Amino acid sequence: MLNLTDRPASDEEGLVSSGSLAIPGQNLDETIKSGTALRVEVACAGEGTVTFTVVSGPAKTARRVNCTQPMTNRFDFTTAGPSLAIQADSPDEDSVGTAYIVSHNS
């Protein structure tokens, strides 16, 4: 699972956003610049699946995560607009929890 305390102190400067999402839910950052290279890490726990979708302008990436597997799904994403939305949706909304971290990809 995601754990900020396991990240090196020097990485904190690269942190863009982190948190958990209600299902269905979305967190929006309107302070990011277009063309920003990011590393997105998503995870969930519980019984079921969660589809995480990252959207910035016309750029969009979706990852379906099995919550019974204790692992983090990591992927690179480059913003294509002046905002970044992290969305979560699941048919099992009452039995799953979510977490995400977005950091600069250097």
Image: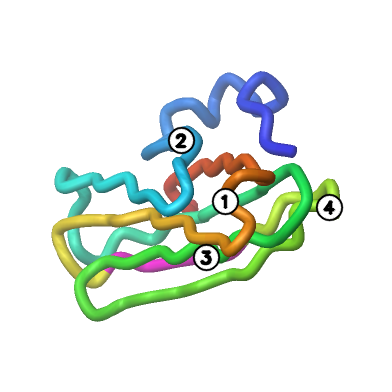
Residue 64 position, x and y percent, is: 63, 69
Lower sequence index among marks 1 and 3: 3
Q: Position of residue 12 (x, y in %)?
A: 49, 26
Position of 62 compared to 13: left or right? right
Q: Is residue 38 left or right of residue 11?
A: left
Which label sits in the foreground, 2 or 3?
2
Alpha-carbon span between mark 2 and mark 4? 21 Å
Eye-nearest disc, 1 or 2: 1
Residue shown at 76% from the left, 44% from the top: 46
Amino acid type of the residue tagged 3 in the rendering: Asp
Residue occupied by mark 3 = 76
Q: CA distance from mark 4 to mark 3?
A: 23 Å
User: Can you identify the residue that label 4 sits on?
Assistant: 68
The magenta span reads 75-79
- Give the residue type at disc 1: Glu
Q: Nearer the viewer, mark 2 or mark 4?
A: 4
Write down the quadrant of residue 85 in the picture. bottom left
**Earlier residue among tags 4 and 3:** 4
